[in-house]
Image (cartoon, grey):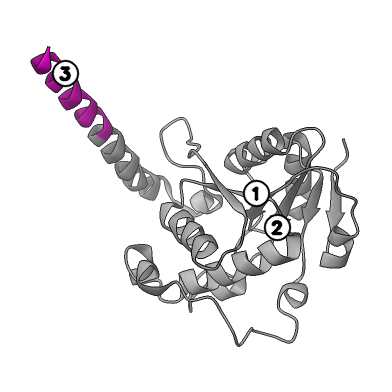
Amino acid sequence: MTTVLLSTADELHARVRSGRRAVVMTMGALHEGHATLIRSAREIAGPEGEVVVTVFVNPLQFGAGEDLDRYPRTLEADLKIAEQAGADAVFAPSVDEVYPGGDPQVRITAGPMGERLEGGSRPGHFDGMLTVVAKLLHLTRPDVALFGQKDAQQLALIRRMVRDLNFGIEIVAVPTVREADGLALSSRNRYLSPEERLTALALSRALFAGRDRHAAQEALRARARE
């Protein structure tokens, strides 16, 4: 199967559809985590359906001083990964295609859910994220969209937006894919120095320790009940 590269919504809408369309949204720099999402989308869409991967670096979700200009852009490599994972098409629109006429005046607001945790240190980030997700859902017109559990707050906000605004699209969560040492796969991991990587591992170690402690407590309770 050859994956088609598309740059406009008109090209995407012109494709003949016979089954379900499953969409995986990315900002590019694809890795095994994205490939897992694409393979899951392929299973959901089935042989008669269609898998579309979007590649778009969304300027609205980058704050002042963040890495918009240096965010990795590797479209040729992304196309190969998408093809190997089973995508039918890669939709890689320009900023003008997604935001004709410049920044949109009307946007999605994340509300209180977007002001805490990551949103507390990145004001406006989740507003920009939801706005582009809404735009891409309208542009790609999927039946189902898949997102990774790694970005838990993002996933929760997308689910809430789809429910609150009656998008009529199924949202499927896919488990986090990790590297051998436990660090969640991320396009931005390449920014980490060896020392920073060790620090970053503290989060996954704490999560796994909490999981194991909870499992041990549940086992003790089960024995006590017996």
User: Magenta part mainly helix, strand or loop?
Assistant: helix
Q: Mark yes or no: residue 69 visible.
A: no
Secondary structure beneath label 2: strand
Q: Is residue 63 above or below residue 174?
A: below
Q: Is residue 28 magenta?
A: no
Q: CA distance from mark 2 to mark 1?
A: 17 Å
Marks 2 and 3: in contact by CB < 8 Å?
no
Q: Residue furthest top?
A: 226
Q: Quadrant of the C terminus?
A: top left
x then y, percent, for residue 136: 68, 64
The residue to which callout 2 is attached is 55
Q: Nearer the viewer, mark 2 or mark 1?
A: 1
Q: Earlier in the sequence, mark 1 or mark 3?
A: 1
- Residue segment shown in magenta: 211-226
* In the image: residue 222, left or right of residue 128: left
Q: Residues within 10 Å of mark 3 (few under 14, many from 20)?
A: few
**Would you name the residue on which mark 1 appears?**
144
Query: Disc 3 designates what residue?
Result: 222
